[in-house]
Image (cartoon, helix red, strand yellow):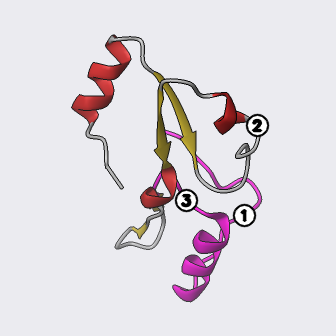
Amino acid sequence: SYILTGRQVKFANNKGVKFLTYNSAHGALTSLGKVDSGIEIFMKQLNSVEIAQDGKSVKVGGGINSKYLVDTLWDAKKQAGQSFLTFI
């Protein structure tokens, strides 16, 4: 597996190279089959959860799996409400 750096992504983007992010089964049969001469970014390697020291917020990676997030929060005696995502 090859991990792209931000510099490489910017270079490819400036050259008009197409990107497709892929995390699990969603879109696998339709979207992946339509990418010709592009870069696939497998998001699962960005599956991270970082709970703040004060326990009031959490930072999650772009490839987060919702079950992994809920399980990690539950193990830390935390939980998320129905509308728990804030994007920055």
In the image, the segment drawn in magenta is: 60-88
Residue type at tag 1: Gly
Q: Position of residue 61 (x, y in %)?
A: 45, 55
Residue at (54, 79) in percent of width and height:
72
Q: Position of residue 37 (x, y in %)?
A: 48, 24
Residue most toward the left?
7
- Residue designated by label 1: 81
**Residue 52 drawn in magenta:** no
Tag 3's secondary structure? loop
The residue lying toward the viewer, choosing from 31 and 81, is: 31
The residue under the point 47% across, 42% down is: 41
Report which quarter residue 1 is drawn in.
bottom left
| Prevalent SS, magenta region | loop
In this rendered view, identify the residue nearer to me: 83 or 71: 71
Disc 3 residue type? Answer: Ile
| Residue 59: image location, x then y, percent | 44, 58
Labels 2 and 1: the sequence-earlier one: 2
Task: Give the residue at mark 2.
Answer: 30
Q: Nearer the viewer, mark 3 or mark 1?
A: 3
Residue 49 picture location, percent across and down: 45, 67
Asked if the residue at tag 3 contacts the one at tag 2, i.e. Cβ–Cβ closer than 8 Å, the answer is no
Upstream in the sequence, badge 3 or badge 1? 3
What amino acid type should be assigned to the residue bearing mark 2?
Thr
80 over 88 or under it: above or below = below
- Which circle marks residue 50 in the picture? none
For marks 2 and 3, the one nearer the N-term is 2
Q: Residues within 10 Å of mark 3 (few under 14, many from 20)?
A: some
* Mark number displayed over residue 64: 3
22 sits left or right of 54 in the view: right
